[in-house]
Amino acid sequence: SQQGEEDPQALSIQEGENATMNCSYKTSINNLQWYRQNSGRGLVHLILIRSNEREKHSGRLRVTLDTSKKSSSLLITASRAADTASYFCATERRDSGYALNFGKGTSLLVTP
Amino acid sequence: DTGVSQDPRHKITKRGQNVTFRCDPISEHNRLYWYRQTLGQGPEFLTYFQNEAQLEKSRLLSDRFSAERPKGSFSTLEIQRTEQGDSAMYLCASSPPSTGNTEAFFGQGTRLTVV
C-alpha cells in the first residue's frame, strides 16, 4: 500500500514562479525522501530529511518536515522548464532494508 | 556509466508467455530492490535483496513472480504466464551498505506491455 499522499496531484506554473508540493504520511518515520521522475524514466533522488530535522535546503530546493502533522513540503524556487516532471515523497519501510513507500506523486508542468 | 542498468528497456509479450528482466546495480551496493509502477501511480515495492539473500517479498509478488540475485551482483525478475494486469514499468534500485545512507539509485526501468 502507498504510505504517502502528495498534494496537489497536478500543478502548472510559469517559469520563474515557485512550486510547492505537499506530502502527508501515516506512520512514524526515520527519514523522508523526495524523488523526481521525468516522463517514462527512472527516479532521481533529490533530498533526504531526517525525522529530527525541520528544514533542509539543496540549491533551489527547500524541504520542510512536520512530524507532529506527519507532513512534508517541497518548494522549488525560480522554476525552469527543465523542472517539468513528477515529484514523489517516500518514507522508509523499516522491515524491508529501508525500501521505500511512495505516494502517487505531483505532476509539475513548467511552461516558458 | 556506473549507474543502475536495466535490460531490456521495453518488452512486449503475449499473454501467457514468460518474461525475464535483468538489473545490474551499482557495483559496491549490497542492497537491491524491485518496484512496479503503473500509470499515474508511485512505485510499489516488490522485493528486497541484501547481497544474494532475498529478505523481503511484498504480497504484490504473486507466485508467478520470482526474483534472484545469485552472486549478490546482478538480479533477475521473472514473470511466468503473464497477464494483462502485469503491464507496468518495473524499476530496479540499489543502495550502499551504510545504514546511515538510505538513498536509492534507480535504473531507467523496463516497461512491460502484455497484449
Image (cartoon, rainbow, N blue to C red):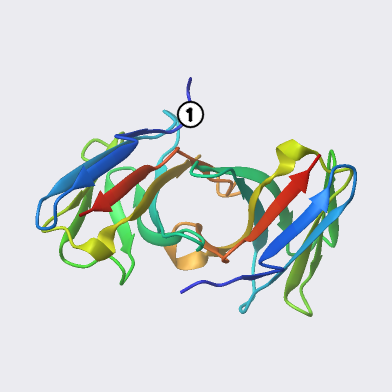
Q: Nearer the viewer, residue A90 or B13?
A: B13
Residue visible at 61% across and 61% down? A105
Q: Amino acid at mark 1?
A: Gly
The C terminus of chain A, quarter of image: top right
Residue visible at 27% across and 65% down?
B85
Give the vertical position of B39 relative to A112 (above or below): below
Q: In this view, which residue lies farthest toward the front?
A: A112
Residue A6: in sight, yes or no?
yes
Chain to which the residue tagged by mark 1 belongs: B
Res. A49 image quadrant:
bottom right
Residue B32, by quadrant, is top left
The relative height of residue A30 versus residue A3 in the rendered view (above or below) is above
The correct choice, above or below, for B25 with respect to A46 in the image is above
Label 1 sits on a secondary structure element that is loop
Direction from residue A41 to residue B38 in the image, left or right: left
Q: Position of residue B21 (x, y in %)?
A: 25, 41
Question: How dense is the environment of label 1, judged by Cα within 10 Å: few (below 14), some, or many (20 and up)?
Answer: some
| Percent of width and height locating residue A71 | 74, 72
* Residue B105 spot, x, y in % from top left: 52, 40
Q: Position of residue B84 (x, y in %)?
A: 23, 62
Q: Residue furthest top?
A: B1
Residue at numbered disc 1: B3
The residue sitting at 73% across, 42% down in the picture is A83
Q: Is residue B32 visible?
A: no
